[in-house]
Amino acid sequence: MKIGQTLCLTGLLIGMVGLMAPAQTITAAQARTDFTYLKRKLDLLHPGMGYYTPKPRMEQLYDSLYNRLTAPMDYLSFYHNVSPFVTAIKDGHTNLNHRKNYIGKQTRFLPFYIRPVDSKYFISHNVSADTSLQRGTELITINDRTIADLHRELMESDHSGSDGDNLTGRRQWSLVQFADYYAAWYGSADSVSISYRLAGDTLVRKTRLRCPNLSNFKATIRRRYGVELNQPVNLSVRVVDTLTHTAVLRVASFMGLKKKDPFQWAFNRRLKQAFRQLKQENVQNLVVDMQGNGGGVVLNSARLLRYWMPKPFRIMEQEEMKRAARAELITRWNPLSALNFSLQYKSDKAGGFASRSSHHRYRPRHKDAFTGNLYFLMNGASFSATTSVLAKTLDAGMGTFVGEASGSAYWGDFAGHFKTITLPYSRLQVRIPLKKLTHAVGPDRANGFTVEPDFTVTRNYDDLMTNRDYVLDYTLRLIRQGVVARKPIPFRPLQASLPLPTVQE
């Protein structure tokens, strides 16, 4: 993921601006009340309780954590006590967040970005006052703990962006937002001690670095690395190789391009412009870059698929929710919400509700449709609606996937609508998905639990030093060599079905 996206995500994470809240002590009774409240809400609303971790195991874990709540504790200790229960759900859309204003203007963050190469960790961007810590400096410890140990703990503390036992999402987010994860888990610190090894040196050195607040962090990184912050805008097209007629379509998000655009017309217009340009440029190899795309509006993912799917398709096989979720979608101030719910959902055999529109079919676009070779750049942060696009394309027997496994499951996920609850005393916030979304894909077409890459690509030291998009670089070499995993499927409207092409080795 690029630095510009990281800053955007950082802003979302700590957007609840305010001063660091004073220390809070939570009594044992308050802690038990909060924990009980959390479990009750999850059991009532979350459609995935027991899906990845069996319910008996969840009950055992709850009892174990609950029984620890026997004495007063500080706020951060309670946060650590709640975290294992939330992460055990193994759902990337279920998030445990700090209380409002716990992280804010005065929160201080580690003064660097780090990136892994093999089993080592290196500074890729430095915002500290010590300018000798240039790109390629190996970071060994922070406060006498190895980076590998810290990274492992931060990965285990937060399951955001990664479903089931998949590790790519957790690994990606915890590295890209290492400073944010560190502050959230260990708290704000004025300074940290580090040990490190400069590029091309064998001597292990030690120093202490001051930690900047967010405004200083942003100002410094833009001053030092401004050129690298200029990333392609969402749905932008650039021709990268005229000899092979190759272009890159950057799909950074499926969120709307405008705040007030309920029908997502702005997204649709820009998508049309992009594929019109691809046709005008006679592009034969299209690289769809969805690295770091955390998802968004399912409608927009369907609109993208329409440009290459060979026949009418559905995104979802089924959308369902628990009965208690109905109360979260009907509001007293909107008298039409009950009617709207009845029009959109119906009772199902499990006692909950199912969507009436999940079987909606999208028709392929004939005008400006892309019929050449498709290559997808993806990583662990390719999540939610992004995985929907990847799964549907794989199910259709199309595309060549490059990078690393996506963050979401091939079968679908828990998303759609969300309810954020606030625990009564600690004020911790937990975002709970309300719907189970099952992709309209054939299980036998899966190439793994997630959508797995046909070609796995990892960063090397030279990639780090040059800040190269190594996944794109590898893909362009595949294109020049004429390598495809799955050939395009020609559109034949008179044929009801077509045999799947074989995967070329």
Image: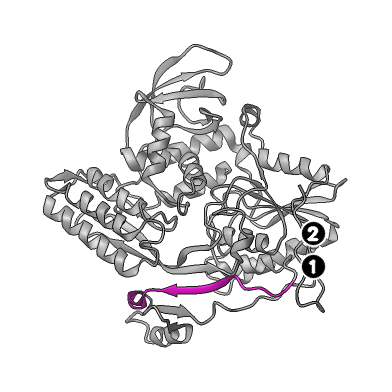
Image coordinates for residue 303, horizontal then vertical, percent: 66, 69
In the image, residue 367 sits, relative to residue 55, either above or below, namely below
Q: Is 28 inside the magenta-drawn segment?
A: no
Q: Answer few, some or many: residues within 10 Å of disc 1's Cα (few below 14, many 20 plus, some between 14 and 19).
A: some
Q: Secondary structure at mark 2?
A: helix
Query: Which secondary structure, mark 1?
Result: loop
Which region is colored magenta? 311-328
Give, as a three-letter code, the residue at label 2: Leu
User: Does residue 431 lie above or below 66 as drawn?
Assistant: below
Residue 325 colored in magenta in the image? yes
**Residue at 49% in and 73% down:** 319
Q: Quadrant of the N terminus?
A: top right
Tell me what residue is drawn at x 33 percent, y 77 percent. 327
- Which residue does the numbered mark 1 point to in the structure image? 368
**For this rendering, which residue is in front, 336 or 59?**
59
Q: Can you identify the residue that label 2 sits on?
A: 278
- Identify the residue at image location x=43%, y=29%: 147
Task: Kindly identify the amino acid type of the residue bearing the numbered disc 1.
Answer: Asp
Q: Nearer the viewer, residue 271 or 346?
A: 346
Q: Is residue 74 visible?
A: yes
